Image: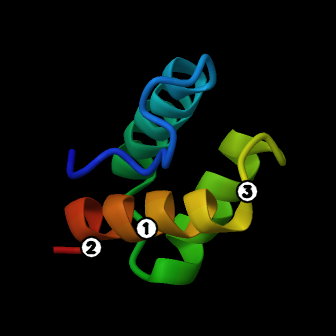
């Protein structure tokens, strides 16, 4: 996993964002998506509006780097 997407490292939400990031990464790895759009779909279902757009994009980018190699 790459840099943590949360912009508030000391916030109470940090652990939740980290958890969602890890779950999204595990789901994507299991599903083996072939495009960034498929990764984004997995992340969208996983985070279910719990993160802002910037964090969502950061998670998609990070997970894509790992699963689309």
Q: Which residue is mark 2?
A: 68
> Dividing the picture into quarters, in which one does residue 56 lie?
bottom right
Query: What colouring style does the render use?
Result: rainbow
Q: Nearer the viewer, residue 40 or 33?
A: 40
Question: What percent of the width, then of the height, locates residue 47?
Answer: 70, 43
User: What kind of element bears circle 2?
Assistant: loop
Looking at the image, tell me whether mark 2 or mark 3 is earlier in sequence order.
3
Q: Are marks 2 and 3 in contact (CB under 8 Å)?
A: no
User: What kind of element bears circle 1?
Assistant: loop
Q: CA distance from mark 2 to mark 1?
A: 7 Å
Q: Nearer the viewer, residue 67 or 61?
A: 61
Q: Nearer the viewer, residue 64 or 17?
A: 17
Q: Nearer the viewer, mark 2 or mark 1?
A: 2
Q: Residue reaching furthest left?
A: 69
Q: Which residue is mark 1?
A: 33
Question: What percent of the width, then of the height, locates residue 44?
Answer: 71, 56
Please state if 55 lies on the left or on the right of 35 as rendered: right
Above or below for 19 versus 61: above
Please state if 52 lies on the left or on the right of 54 as rendered: right
Above or below for 68 versus 22: below
Q: Which residue is mark 3?
A: 52
Question: What percent of the width, then of the height, locates residue 15?
Answer: 50, 19
Q: Dot 3: within a 10 Å radius of its alpha carbon, few (fewer than 14), some, or many (20 or more) residues?
A: few
Looking at the image, tell me whether mark 2 or mark 1 is earlier in sequence order.
1
Q: Are marks 2 and 1 in contact (CB under 8 Å)?
A: yes
- State which quarter of the image contains the N terminus: top left
């Amino acid at each position: 996993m790459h840099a943590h997407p949360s912009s508030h490292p000391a916030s109470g939400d940090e652990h939740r964002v980290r958890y969602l990031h890890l779950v999204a990464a595990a789901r994507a790895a299991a599903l083996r998506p072939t495009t960034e759009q498929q990764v984004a779909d997995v992340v969208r279902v996983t985070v279910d509006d719990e993160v802002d757009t910037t964090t969502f994009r950061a998670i998609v980018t990070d997970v894509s780097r790992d699963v689309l190699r």
